[in-house]
Image (tube, rainbow, N blue to C red):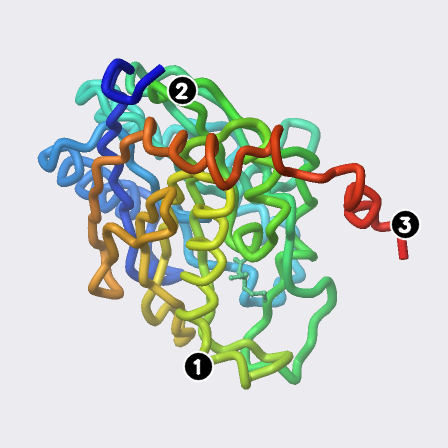
């Protein structure tokens, strides 16, 4: 159908970047910040607000914590948990949907780095559990700070694309954005809008020569992923200096052309918005990146299998 005869599908999306959350900041004060960001996004016309990864607490994997109770204190046993309920209530009353990253502890004791997606009417669209869990499992005292995600979180086992917000949408989390498979799996499912929260320390201890490239790599991977799959990508940081660790901000909204159409200017709490025209995805999905017509899975399917050499 010619584009001008199609129903318009323009979703105004906000990226709600967070500045640092210090360890002593109590969770209700963080929820107040989230609500203020959501209200500001709504005042700018947004109907979907994307919050960062692990948006309720400081980024606790930077510490080696031995006491299981202390570790579990960073996790939510239900969502909404009582302290987060006001965010759900305000969002529903304003008719605004949102994606919120948090540490999830299931009833049977599993731990995940999870994001929940909530529709404008307050219904839960789905949960996503981070697939690519970076960092290390054991205490490595040589580092200036730890990255113990692999100690505290189990990996999730699937990407999903949901019918929501007038289109096909998906979630990914931080390190996932560096992996082309994240975008391609969503792209193959027709995803039109991928939401990604992140916490990215600028110092990368295993190879500090990468430090100066933190911002470059951030936009490189998300812009390429958007373009090569004809989808909108919304990348939202928790940035700034948190417990002495400087983290990348630079939240941005990227069009299916690969162009950045909105970008945060600060390292603090900040809202960015863009009109995401979901019909624009077809310009790419039906031309250069018409997967059905041009992909050659019979040639390279095998090299995506880790058993292949
Ligand atoms: N949170 C997260 O996944 N951060 C990683 C840091 C690099 S791996 C130690 C990232 O990919 O941004």
Instruction: Specify which label sits upstream in the sequence, 1 or 2.
Output: 2
Q: Residue at x 42, y 74 (%)?
A: 245
Does residue 288 appear left or right of residue 148 in this picture? left
Q: Residue at x 15, y 35 (%)?
A: 39
As drawn, 179 above or below 171? below
Crowd around label 1: few <14 · some 14–19 · many ≥20 (10 Å): few
Secondary structure found at label 3: loop
Image quadrant assignment for residue 185: top right
Q: Identify the image quadrant of the C terminus.
A: bottom right
Decide which of 264, 274 is in the foreground and name it: 274
- Cβ atoms at labels 3 and 2 below 8 Å apart: no
Work out how far the residue at label 1 is from the one at label 2, CA to CA, in angstroms.
38 Å
Q: For mark 1, what is the residue?
A: 212
Residue 133 horizontal/vertical position (percent): 64, 53
Mark 1 Cβ and ligand 1 under 8 Å apart: no
Q: For mark 2, what is the residue?
A: 164
Residue 137 horizontal/vertical position (percent): 73, 62
Secondary structure found at label 2: strand
Does residue 6 appear left or right of residue 209 in this picture? left
Q: Which mark is residue 307?
A: 3
Instruction: Specify which label sits upstream in the sequence, 3 or 1.
Output: 1
């Amino acid at each position: 159908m010619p584009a001008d005869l199609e129903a318009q599908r323009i979703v105004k999306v906000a990226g709600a970047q967070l500045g640092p959350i210090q360890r002593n900041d109590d969770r209700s004060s963080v929820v107040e910040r989230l609500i203020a960001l959501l209200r500001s996004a709504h005042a700018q016309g947004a109907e979907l607000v994307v919050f960062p990864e692990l948006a309720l607490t400081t980024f606790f994997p930077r510490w080696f914590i031995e006491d299981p109770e202390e570790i579990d204190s960073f996790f939510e046993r239900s969502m909404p948990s009582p302290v987060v309920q006001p965010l759900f209530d305000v969002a529903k009353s304003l008719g605004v949907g949102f994606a919120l990253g948090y540490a999830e502890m299931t009833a049977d004791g599993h731990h995940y780095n999870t994001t929940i997606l909530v529709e404008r009417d307050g219904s839960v669209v789905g949960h996503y559990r981070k697939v690519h869990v970076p960092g290390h499992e054991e205490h490595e005292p040589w580092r200036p700070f730890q990255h113990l995600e692999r100690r505290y979180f189990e990996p999730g086992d699937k990407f999903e694309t949901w019918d929501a917000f007038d289109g096909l949408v998906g979630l990914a989390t931080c390190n996932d954005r560096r992996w082309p498979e994240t975008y391609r799996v969503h792209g193959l499912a027709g995803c039109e809008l991928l939401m990604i929260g992140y916490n990215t320390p600028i110092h990368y201890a295993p190879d500090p020569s990468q430090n100066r490239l933190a911002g470059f790599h951030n936009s490189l991977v998300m812009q390429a992923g958007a373009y090569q799959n004809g989808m909108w990508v919304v990348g939202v940081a928790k940035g700034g200096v948190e417990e002495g660790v400087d983290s990348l901000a630079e939240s941005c909204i990227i069009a299916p052309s690969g162009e950045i159409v909105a970008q945060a200017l600060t390292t603090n709490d900040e809202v960015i918005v863009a009109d995401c025209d979901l019909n624009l995805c077809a310009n790419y999905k039906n031309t250069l990146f018409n997967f059905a017509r041009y992909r050659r899975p019979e040639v390279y399917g095998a090299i995506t299998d880790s058993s292949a050499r």
